[in-house]
Amino acid sequence: MSNDTPTSTEAELIAVRKEKLAKMRDLGINPFGEKFQTTITPGELKAEFTDEKKVTLAGRLLAIRDMGKSVFATLGDIHGRIQIYINKKGVSEQEWEAYKLLDLGDWIGISGETFTTGKGEPSVKVETLTVLSKALRPMPDKWHGINDQETKYRKRHLDLMSNQESADLFIIRSQIIAEMRSYLHGLGYLEVETPMLHDMASGAAARPFETHHNALNMPLTMRVAPELHLKRLLVGGFTKVFELNRNFRNEGISRRHNPEFTMLEAYEAYADFEVMAEMVEDMVCHLAEKFFGTLKIEHKDGEGNIKRTIDLSRPWKRAPYKDLVRGVAGEDWFNLTAEERRAKAKKELKVEIGADLEDYEVTQQVFEKLVEEHTFDPCFVTHVDSKLIPLAKENPKDPSVIDVYELIINGQEISPGYSELNDPVVQARRFAEQSGGEEQVTDTDFVEAMEHGMPPAGGIGIGVDRLIMLLTGAPTIRDVVLFPQLKRKD
């Protein structure tokens, strides 16, 4: 049985476990077992429990209550747990000796018959016991788990084995992503995979990770977005296409940013940004209701108190970008000169403005600080400045803005959506303006593809990690990414 005690040092606990490991081998027991065929999992058994049923299951020992010649223990994994009962007379002598060498954290397989204890606890009476893996290091303290946040992120395996809430969150994440795929498949979308290694960064204004391909002797970048490859598929004849995969951006790390992140991008021929907004609104509400049973999502502070409740009830607000900016910066904002806007932003609005920002970037900074960060319930911000997004269509009534939405929820962008630009002449001009006329940083292959004819289309991106944060109430992206990027320890 487990000899782990709070007063022992980790080195002492490891030494004791290694002694037990040696004793198992002396008894002819393989401490790191092989294939073990199960009939049910601990969680499934608990959910559909009936007495007098023969079962074979496996899991980690999570608790042990030893009473001498008999023992109650808890066996489980991230999906659930069940109580087991071992009696000296009910198993072989070797299996009883094996049990006495077990510790919390060890993996075992058992066969036996189900029964309910006098206290009403569903249980399994063990008839055979197989050691599957001897844990040489102790589990985290069963009462306090892991309190240090960095340890949770750096050693996720310890977090998962000691914190059921964390395990449940990642189970939900997996199920949400599967449901997103199912939702799009139901609408007739085809899932595709496009390259993660690009010969130039494209699809988003972001700093890429750079690498080198030795055989071809050429520089490559990790993709910042799959957009241009997916649009080539529209040119090729795909009419509804999506990719759900990783993007990589060599930029800052924050509670909302990780250098690699999961992104959904989808494109639909003959649609526009308004069609895509309707789809995103429906999808997010569908996910909230399916997995959480509500459209009101509670977000809590670090002490577990409700910080705010986000209301996803439909219809979601739609508001033009310029109207929102005027609402915080004044009705005269777009009538001012560039110098006057910069001065007003700094002195009156108290928004920090970098010296190298272009005039449209000053307005965007005001928007981000005074509108976006204070918008919590869903809002589709429409018709943004045309200089901000070079891959979307200009609005036919006002060429200074483009037909797009930026979906803001909980103070951050969750999803952009465009009426996609499909005029190759305009696209080439936009690329040239964005690159300052440097042809070598313009994706001429994409423009050439567009010249073969790209249908009008609507497109979206959804930051999956941020969406999971929104739906689960997680305060930081590190809580919803299994292995977030951290600085290496010295």
Image (spheres, rainbow, N blue to C red):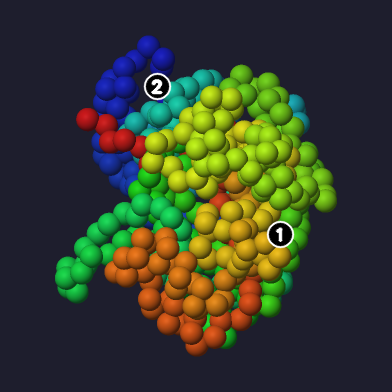
Q: Amino acid at mark 1?
A: Ala
Q: Residue furthest top?
A: 7
Query: Which circle marks residue 430 in the picture?
Result: none
**In what quadrant of the picture does the N terminus appear?**
top left
Q: Could you classify mark 1 by the number of other residues whose Cα lies within 10 Å: few (under 14), some (14-19), or many (20 or more)?
A: many
Residue behind mark 1 = 277
Query: Which circle marks residue 3 in the picture?
Result: 2
Tell me if residue 238 comes above or below residue 354 in the rendering: below
Tell me if residue 182 comes above or below residue 148 in the rendering: below
Residue 137 location in percent, x, y? 34, 31
**In what quadrant of the picture does the C terminus appear?**
top left
Q: Is residue 70 left or right of residue 9?
A: right
Counting residues from the start of the chain, the first of labels 1 and 2 encountered is 2
Dividing the picture into quadrants, the one containing residue 471 is top right
Q: Amino acid at mark 2?
A: Asn
Name the residue nearer the viewer: 45 or 366: 366
Q: State the SS at label 2.
A: loop
Q: CA distance from mark 1 to mark 2?
A: 58 Å
Q: Are marks 1 and 2 in contact (CB under 8 Å)?
A: no
Q: Is residue 106 left or right of residue 387?
A: left
Name the residue nearer the viewer: 7 or 458: 458
Name the residue nearer the viewer: 254 or 158: 254
Residue appearing at x 34%, y 43% in the figure:
31
Q: State the SS at label 1.
A: helix
